[in-house]
Image (cartoon, rainbow, N blue to C red):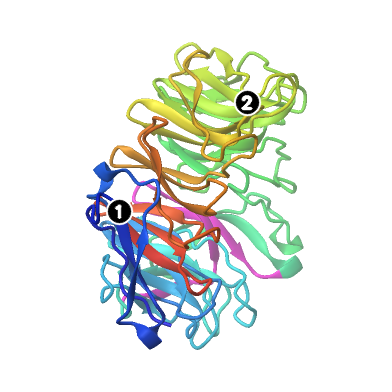
Amino acid sequence: MSYVRMRLLVPLLAGALFFLFPRPASSADELLLIPMYHLLLGKSGTTIELVKEIDPGEMDAGPEDLYNWDGLLLFGTNDGVHGNEVWKSDGTEAGTVMVKDIHEGEGSSDSYSPYGNSIGWDRDFTALGDFVYFAATSSNQPASLWKTDGTEAGTDWVKDVSPAKMIVFNSALYFSGTTGSGIFSDTELWTSDGTTEGTNMVKNISEREEEGGPSYPGQESGFVVFGDAFYFDVANTEGNTPPEPCRLWKSDGTEEGTVAVKPGTEIDPSGEFAVCNNILYFVADDGIHGPELWKSIDGSNAGTTMLDETNFSQPPYRFTEYNGSLYFRANDGAHGSELWKLDCATDAVTMVKDIKPGPDSSYVEYLTVLNNILYFTAEDDTAGDELWKTDGTEAGTTRVVDIYPGPDGSSINALTAFQGMLYFSANDGELGDELWQSNGTEEGTVLLLDINPGFDWSYPYGFTEVNGALFFASVTPPTTAWQLWRLRR
């Protein structure tokens, strides 16, 4: 099968909007005019186009891990010939190409085993200097650290250590690195300057490498830079000398500077880190109070304290800063999982609104700031899971629109702010999960393009801004394969 580019057209034919939809290659010169339902005429300047038909068959491994590297899009995808490999795109068909066939042949470089099928995991693209670092497996090596300058010749293996949760700190790369396999594997804190010799373990926190006792740094909370160090959780400190029960750690990048924040305590981070008003906030369980909000003003033992007990029954998460406060989803055991906020100036913690009254949960997701308003998805008793917004007050927390009329939710996914608009996938009950746009008002929330016409869905995801355009992946008929698309305004 073959596709030509799909493009939004200016209003035509008695004020209706249409787009071109190609037939299969056997009649590629024959085009259909299909009406664009629910699209406002004022949005006719938007262009949506298929960048390239990368995998022409029925492959399920579509574009993933979309990453903006200084105006160039990097991503992983499967063209049906070379397996899932690293690709790049400048937004043109000719400029969308495979960077290198790392796992030569049909094998995929995103698999855990060089001999197994592609099961996929986060490549964790991270830029440092003139290179982007990522995880990959080659034809003769297990999961390892790789780097690329965007060219085939400049894409090289660095070292046999599988990276995750990569972060840049003081012009060096730090990550949770795994070596060995099975019961002989070890996961500790590593660093790299991009060379094999300069890629080494920072500290063996568990001190049990011979027994296969990994510490799994950053497994739950990831890494966050705060002040003159970066902070992370540690899952296993057994064997540490002396014994160290504290699982909140920090590092200045040196072995001696990689230490527990509150030595001797049983603090165990269980969620995200967030920096707000020059204060580090996180969720932790000290073995006494359960999962609570904590803060650190300077990374010291004395300066790291629990906020007033909130008695959350589930750890808060989805931290998003908005107007000097951290907003998040939490369950206090009485109101279900709802929208809360933490004032970063006073440390006051309050529920913004009980969207689904009583013990039931509204399941707040996709907190996204646009034009000084915080948008998110939530479920209430009347409209199901839909688009909401808040100004931080209970009265100012309202549903924007009921896309799927009635109690069934529209299953909004991948809410993304781009050039003054929100873009996302949603289902209105008639056309499946398709590409939508919203300016934050009911009348301004519209279906932008029914990519897979009719009830069938296209399920766009991975929205990533590059050079003033929004790239995303979408199922592209007549196959079931996800392809690379681009939206410009």
Residue 335 showing in the rendered view: yes
Residue 142 lies within the magenta run: no
Asked if residue 162 is positioned above or below residue 114 in the image, the reply reads above
Give the label on residue 229, or none: none
Most extreme residue toward the front, as rendered? 14
Residue type, mark 2 in image = Glu
Q: Position of residue 215 (x, y in %)?
A: 66, 51
Residue type, mark 1 in image = Leu
Give SS at disc 2.
strand
Q: Residue at x 42, y 31 (%)?
A: 442
Give the label on residue 17, or none: 1
Q: Position of residue 299 (x, y in %)?
A: 51, 28
The segment highlighted magenta reads 154-181
Residue 262 showing in the rendered view: no
Between marks 1 and 2, how big is the CA–CA gap?
Answer: 40 Å
Q: Which residue is mark 2?
A: 338
Which SS does the magenta portion mostly show?
strand
Q: Position of residue 92 (x, y in %)?
A: 26, 69
Q: Nearer the observer, disc 1 or disc 2?
A: 1
Q: Residue at x 69, y 29 (%)?
A: 361
Q: Earlier in the sequence, mark 1 or mark 2?
A: 1
Residue 179 lies within the magenta run: yes
Q: Residue at x 70, y 20 (%)?
A: 335
